[in-house]
Image (cartoon, grey):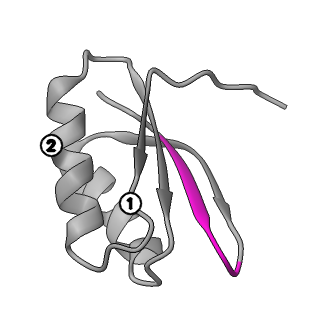
Amino acid sequence: MTKYHWDSELDSTGLLCPLPVLKIRKKLKEMQKGSILRVMADDPAAIIDIPHFCHESGNKILKKDISDEEQIYLLMKM
């Protein structure tokens, strides 16, 4: 199992669509290529929105852990 170390973290819990994706976009703009962003979310729409954003923007989802209470994503800026 691959262990990842992230360069930055974004807590978007409590935020509803489209705010988590807007905050992710802003945060990734500030980061270097190849950097990893750890995102925490709890918006049910984020399960669809975050992967869609990554696909459209060319960034990569390295890992996602989804439970009933929380979603954790590791995103790599490409």
**Residue 63 - label:** none
User: Callout 2: 10 Å neighbours few (<14), some, many (20+)?
Assistant: few
Q: Amino acid at mark 2?
A: Lys
The stretch of residues the image draws in magenta is: 68-74
Q: Quadrant of residue 21?
A: bottom left
Q: Position of residue 48 (x, y in %)?
A: 40, 75
Q: Is residue 76 above or below residue 33?
A: below
Q: Position of residue 62 (x, y in %)?
A: 55, 39
- The residue wearing badge 2 is 26
Does residue 27 belong to the magenta stretch? no
Q: Which residue ends up furthest to the front in the rendered image?
A: 14
In the image, what residue occupies the spot 76% across and 27% down?
2
Distance from label 2 to label 1 (Cα)?
13 Å
In the image, what residue occupies the spot 17% across and 58% down?
22
Disc 1 is placed on an element classified as loop
Q: Is residue 24 left or right of residue 30?
A: right
Q: Which residue ends up furthest to the right in the rendered image?
A: 1
Q: Position of residue 75 (x, y in %)?
A: 44, 40
Q: Is residue 56 left or right of residue 77?
A: left
In the image, what residue occupies the spot 66% across and 77% down?
69
Q: Which image quarter is the C terminus in? A: top left
Q: Position of residue 7 (x, y in %)?
A: 45, 20
Depth order, front residue of 31/13 = 13
Q: Amino acid at mark 1?
A: Ser
- The residue wearing badge 1 is 12
Q: Which image quarter is the N terminus in? A: top right
- Between disc 2 and disc 1, the foreground one is 1
Q: Is residue 24 above or below residue 5?
A: below
Q: Is residue 71 above or below residue 59?
A: below
